[in-house]
Amino acid sequence: MTDPRDRLIVALDLPSVGAAESLVAQLGDTVSFYKIGYELGFAGGLGLARELIADGRKVFIDFKLHDIGNTVARGIASLAALGASFATVHAYPQTMRAAVEGREGSALRLLAVTVLTSYDEADLRAAGYSAGVEETVARRVVQARETGIDGIVCAPTDATRVRTLLGPDRAIVTPGVRPEGAASGDQKRIATPFAAIRAGADHLVVGRPIVAAPDPAAAARAVQAEIAAALAAS
Ligand SMILES: O=C(O)c1cc(=O)[nH]c(=O)n1[C@@H]1O[C@H](COP(=O)(O)O)[C@@H](O)[C@H]1O
C-alpha cells in the first residue's frame, strides 16, 4: 500500500449530503477514501455512502458502536451489507466480540477505538479510569487482537507502541493529524502526517485541515505529499 491516496481518509464531517457531494466533487480523483460519522450519517449520509461505494470509492462508517452484544452484532451486520470497508466500535471486549460475530462472512474490516484523541490523562481520570492513556491503549490493543479485530484507531502519538503490540498485519488508523501550523481544535494527542506515517500508521483520518481549507484539494495533496515523503524515508 504505497499509494498515498490509499493512506488518506478524509472525514466528511459536514451537515448535509449536498455539502458532502460538493466537497467530493472538488476533491475529484485526489481522494478515494472517505469517512462518514455522526454529523453526515445522521443527515442522510448512508445513502451517500452507497453512492460513493458504487462509484468505486472506499467508505469508512464511523459510528463508534457500543451497546449490548446483540445490538452491536446486528448493527455491524447492516453496515457490512452496505459495502463499507471499515467500521468502528469502542474497544470493550464484549462489544468487539459481538462486532466480530456480526461481520462474519463479509469484507467489512472492524476498527477498535482505543482512547479518543481528544482525551488526555485528566480526561481519562474524569471518566473514572485509574489507568493512564498509555496503559489503557495497551490493554485495549491486546484485547482487540485477541478478539479478532482487524485494526486499531489510536492517536499518532500512540502508533509506535501500538504497532509493537498489534503486530505487522493489522491496520493502524490515526486521527488527530495536523499539518505543521494547523489549529488543533479539540484534539489533544496530535502529530503531523509525516510523523504519523513514520510512527507506523497505515491510514490517516483528516477532517478539518482539509474540509475547512480554502482549497481542500490542495490541502489533501499537501497531506499526501507528506505521506509520500514519510514512506520514502521508511
Ligand atoms: O474514530 C475516529 O475516526 C476518531 C477517533 C478519535 O480518537 N479521534 C477522532 O478525531 N476521530 C475522528 O477523526 C476525525 C478527526 O477530524 P479532525 O479533527 O477535523 O481532523 C473526526 O471525524 C473524529 O470523529
Image: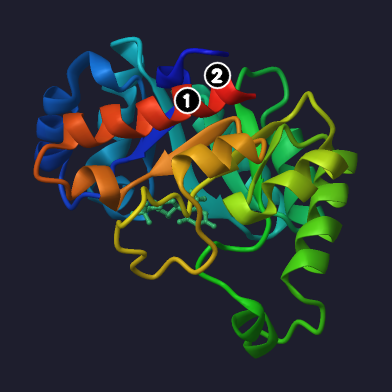
Task: Answer with the quarter of the image where residue 117 lies.
Answer: bottom right
Query: Can you give x and y, in whole percent of width and height, for residue 37 in the image?
Result: 38, 48
**Apparent side of residue 27 relative to residue 233 in the rendered image (left or right):** left
The secondary element bearing badge 2 is classed as helix
Q: Nearer the viewer, residue 42 or 159?
A: 159
**Apparent side of residue 31 relative to residue 163 in the rendered image (left or right):** left
Query: Can you give x and y, in whole percent of width and height, for residue 199 in the image?
Result: 65, 41
- Amino acid type assigned to the residue bearing label 2 in the image: Ala
- Return the residue at label 2: 232
Q: Which residue sits at x=35%, y=34%? A: 223
Of all residues shown, which one is farthest toward the front?
A: 233
Asked whether the beta carbons under mark 1 and mark 2 sit within 8 Å of each other, the answer is yes
- Return the residue at label 1: 229
Above or below for 64 versus 219? below
Q: Which residue sits at x=19%, y=28%? A: 24
Q: Which residue sits at x=32%, y=36%? A: 46
The C terminus: image quadrant: top right
Mark 2 crowd level (few <14, some 14–19, many ≥20, 10 Å Cα): few
